[in-house]
Amino acid sequence: IFTDAIIVLDDSSDDRTVDIVRSLANDCKVERIITKDGSWSRNETADRNVLLQAGRDVGGTHFIVLDADEAFTANLAEDDDLRRQILSLEVGQNIALHWIQLWKSTHYYRIDRLYDGDGIVH
């Protein structure tokens, strides 16, 4: 388990995102769904501030920010290591994780070059 609660910000999607989140809310600890009305508008700083305030409103002190198309790798769940690291943070500290970009499938990823699952550069 990575979180005690989830806050979702839907930026005017038209693909049933809000309905899907609502259907999973109890099982997935969704505390709040924030929706933007109107046309899509990306303002990452404002969105992050809205999410952080909503997280604080439900008692949050440590936050993980992910887009809907991002995920943690399974090894972060091993031995509850990530949770322990997060809870050991002092005020103002943060953890930066490496971002691996999958490329057209789960078998290829990019860092600065295209690699396959065996580490071969393409």
Image (cartoon, grey):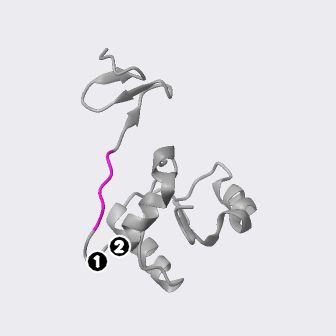
Q: Is residue 19 visible?
A: yes
Residue 95 in magenta stretch: yes
- What residue did someone put label 2 on? 88
Camera-side residue of 39 and 102? 102
Which region shows up in magenta?
94-98
Specify the quadrant of the image occupied by residue 87. bottom left
As helix, strand or loop, the secondary structure at mark 2 comes to loop
Check the image and report above or below for 100 versus 109: below
Residue 72: x, y in percent? 47, 49
Give left or right: position of 83 versus 27.
Answer: left
Quarter holding the N terminus?
A: bottom right
Residue drawn 26% across and 24% down? Answer: 113
- What residue did someone put label 1 on? 90
Q: Is residue 35 visible?
A: no
Residue drawn 70% across and 55% down? Answer: 20
Q: Amino acid at mark 1?
A: Glu
Q: Amino acid at mark 2?
A: Ser
Residue drawn 62% across and 51% down? Answer: 14
Mark 1 residue crowding within 10 angstroms, few (<14) / some (14–19) / many (20+): few
Check the image and report above or below for 79 versus 48: above
